[in-house]
Image (cartoon, rainbow, N blue to C red):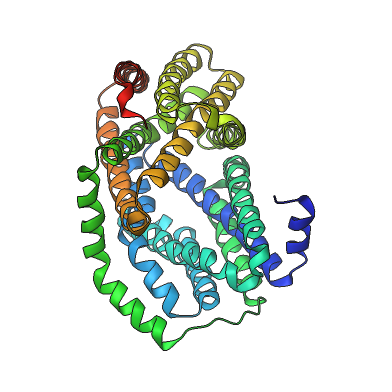
C-alpha cells in the first residue's frame, strides 16, 4: 500500500522532482496550445465545425502515425536528451505561429504544419518521460513514482484547460501562444538539470532495429487476433463505439458552447475542467467499489446515463444559457464516462494473453484514434448544414439506445460471463 510519506520521500529525490515539475509545466503547455488553437480558429472561421476539425486533426494524427515508432527511437538514444530536444522544438514550433504564421493572410497550411510537427515531437517526449522514470528512482519507489506521475498529469491537464481557457481570453491568441512556448522552454531547462545514468547497450540497439522492422507486422498480428476471440472482439467494439462517440461530439460541442455561452475559450476551458474533475472522482469511486458489479453491465448502464446527460446538457444549456447548469452536467458526465473506460481496459487486461497485450493494445490505439478522427470529420461536416444542438441530441439518443440494447442482451444471454 502506498502511503503519503512515500510521495514526499520521492519528491526529495532531486532528479525525479525536476522531472515532476517539468511534467506539470509541459502538461499545462499542451492544454494551453489546444485552447489557443481553438481561439485561433474561432477568430479565423467563427462557427465553422469543419475548419476546426481540420485544425484539431493535426493534434491527433501523430498519435497513430508517430506513436508506434517513437518507442523504438527513444530506447536507442538518451531519453533525457530526447526530452530536452523535444521541448525546445515544441517551443520553437509553437512560437513560430504568433511570430510568423498568424500574419500570413488566408494561409492556414503553415499553421497545420507547425501544429503537426509540435504534436509529433510530443509523442517522443511522452514516451521518453515514461521510460526514464525507472532510471531516476529505486525499484521500491517505482509504484509510488508512477502513481504520483499519473495523478499529477491528470490534475495538471484538468487545471490546464480551465486556466488556459481563461488565460487565452485575457492575453489574446498571440499572448497565449507566447506563454505556451515559454512553458516548453522552461520544461527543457528543468530536464537539463537532471543527472541520470542511462544504459544503452549494443544488444538493445540490435533489438530496437528488429522491433522497428516488425512494427507493421505486429500491428497486423494484433489486429488479426481480435476477431478470433469473441469476447475480445466485443470489448474492442465497445472501445471503438466510445471513441467514435467522443469524436462525434468533440468539435460539435466546442462550437455549441462557444455560440451558446458567448466566449471562445473561457467557458469551454472551465467546462473541460469540471468534466475532468468528474472523470478523476469517478475513477477514484469506481476503483474502490467497481469490483462488486459486472463490468459489462456497468459499461452499458453508463452508456445510457451518458446519453441522457448529453441530451440534458444540450437542451438545458440551449434554453438557459447558464454556465452553472453546463458545469454541473459536465461534472456528472465525467463521473459517468470513467467507469466505461476503466471497465473496458480491465476487461482487455483480463481477456488478452500476456504475450499478445502489447500488439493488441497498440493496434486498438491506432484503430480507436482512426474512429475518433473519422466520426469527428463526419459530425463536423454535418455541423456545417444542420443545427448543432440536434446533432448532439441525436448522438445522446444513440448512446442510450446502444446501452439499452446491450443491457437487454446481457440479461438475456448471461452465458457471455465476462
Query: Which residue does the image show at 33% across and 37% down from the upper left?
Result: 235
Residue 137: x percent and y percent? 66, 69
Q: Residue furthest front?
A: 415
Q: Residue furthest bottom?
A: 202
Residue 257: x percent and y percent? 47, 27
The answer to whether 315 is drawn above or below residue 306 in the figure is: above
Query: Which residue does the image show at 32% across and 56% down from the upper left?
Result: 356
Query: Which residue does the image show at 59% across and 67% down from the upper left?
Result: 133
Residue 127: x percent and y percent? 47, 64
Asked whether 197 or 327 is in front, the reply is 197
The answer to whether 175 is drawn above or below residue 237 in the figure is: below
Asked whether 110 or 397 is in front, the reply is 397
From the viewer's perspective, tell me whether residue 169 is left or right of residue 351. Answer: right
Q: Is residue 407 visible?
A: yes
Q: Quadrant of the C terminus?
A: top left
From the viewer's perspective, tell me whether residue 285 is left or right of residue 107. Answer: right
Q: Is residue 105 visible?
A: no
Residue 305: x percent and y percent? 45, 19
Amino acid at each position: 500500500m502506498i502511503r503519503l510519506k512515500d510521495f514526499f520521500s520521492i519528491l526529495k529525490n532531486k532528479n525525479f522532482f525536476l522531472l515532476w515539475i517539468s511534467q506539470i509545466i509541459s502538461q499545462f503547455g499542451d492544454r494551453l496550445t489546444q485552447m489557443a488553437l481553438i481561439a485561433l480558429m474561432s477568430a479565423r472561421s467563427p462557427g465553422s465545425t469543419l475548419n476546426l476539425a481540420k485544425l484539431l486533426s493535426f493534434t491527433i494524427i501523430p498519435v497513430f502515425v508517430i506513436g508506434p515508432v517513437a518507442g523504438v527511437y527513444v530506447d536507442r538514444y538518451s531519453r533525457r536528451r530526447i526530452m530536452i530536444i523535444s521541448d525546445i522544438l515544441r517551443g520553437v514550433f509553437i512560437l513560430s505561429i504568433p511570430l510568423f504564421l498568424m500574419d500570413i493572410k488566408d494561409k492556414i497550411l503553415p499553421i497545420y504544419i507547425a501544429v503537426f510537427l509540435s504534436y509529433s515531437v510530443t509523442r517522443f517526449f511522452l514516451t521518453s518521460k515514461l521510460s526514464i522514470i525507472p532510471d531516476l528512482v529505486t525499484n521500491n519507489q517505482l509504484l509510488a513514482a508512477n502513481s504520483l506521475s499519473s495523478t499529477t498529469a491528470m490534475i495538471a491537464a484538468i487545471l490546464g484547460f480551465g486556466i488556459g481557457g481563461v488565460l487565452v481570453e485575457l492575453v489574446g491568441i498571440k499572448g497565449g501562444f507566447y506563454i505556451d512556448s515559454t512553458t516548453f522552454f522552461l520544461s527543457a531547462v528543468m530536464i537539463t538539470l537532471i543527472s541520470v545514468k542511462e544504459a544503452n547497450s549494443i544488444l538493445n540497439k540490435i533489438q530496437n532495429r528488429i522491433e522497428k522492422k516488425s512494427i507493421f507486422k505486429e500491428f497486423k498480428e494484433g489486429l488479426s487476433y481480435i476477431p478470433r476471440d469473441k469476447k475480445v472482439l466485443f470489448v474492442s467494439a465497445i472501445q471503438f463505439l466510445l471513441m467514435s462517440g467522443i469524436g462525434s461530439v468533440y468539435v460539435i460541442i466546442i462550437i455549441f458552447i462557444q455560440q451558446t455561452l458567448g466566449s471562445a475559450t473561457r467557458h469551454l476551458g472551465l467546462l473541460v475542467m469540471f468534466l475532468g474533475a468528474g472523470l478523476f472522482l469517478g475513477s477514484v469511486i469506481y476503483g474502490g467499489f467497481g469490483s462488486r458489479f459486472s463490468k459489462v453491465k456497468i459499461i452499458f448502464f453508463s452508456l445510457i446515463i451518458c446519453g441522457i446527460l448529453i441530451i440534458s446538457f444540450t437542451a438545458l444549456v440551449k434554453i438557459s444559457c447558464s454556465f452553472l447548469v453546463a458545469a454541473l452536467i459536465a461534472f456528472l458526465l465525467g463521473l459517468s464516462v470513467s467507469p466505461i473506460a476503466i471497465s473496458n481496459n480491465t476487461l482487455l487486461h483480463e481477456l488478452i494473453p500476456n504475450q499478445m497485450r502489447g500488439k493488441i493494445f497498440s493496434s486498438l490505439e491506432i484503430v480507436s484514434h482512426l474512429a475518433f478522427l473519422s466520426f469527428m470529420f463526419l459530425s463536423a461536416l454535418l455541423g456545417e448544414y444542420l443545427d448543432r444542438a440536434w446533432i448532439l441530441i441525436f448522438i445522446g439518443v444513440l448512446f442510450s439506445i446502444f446501452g439499452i440494447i446491450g443491457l437487454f442482451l446481457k440479461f438475456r444471454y448471461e452465458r457471455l460471463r465476462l
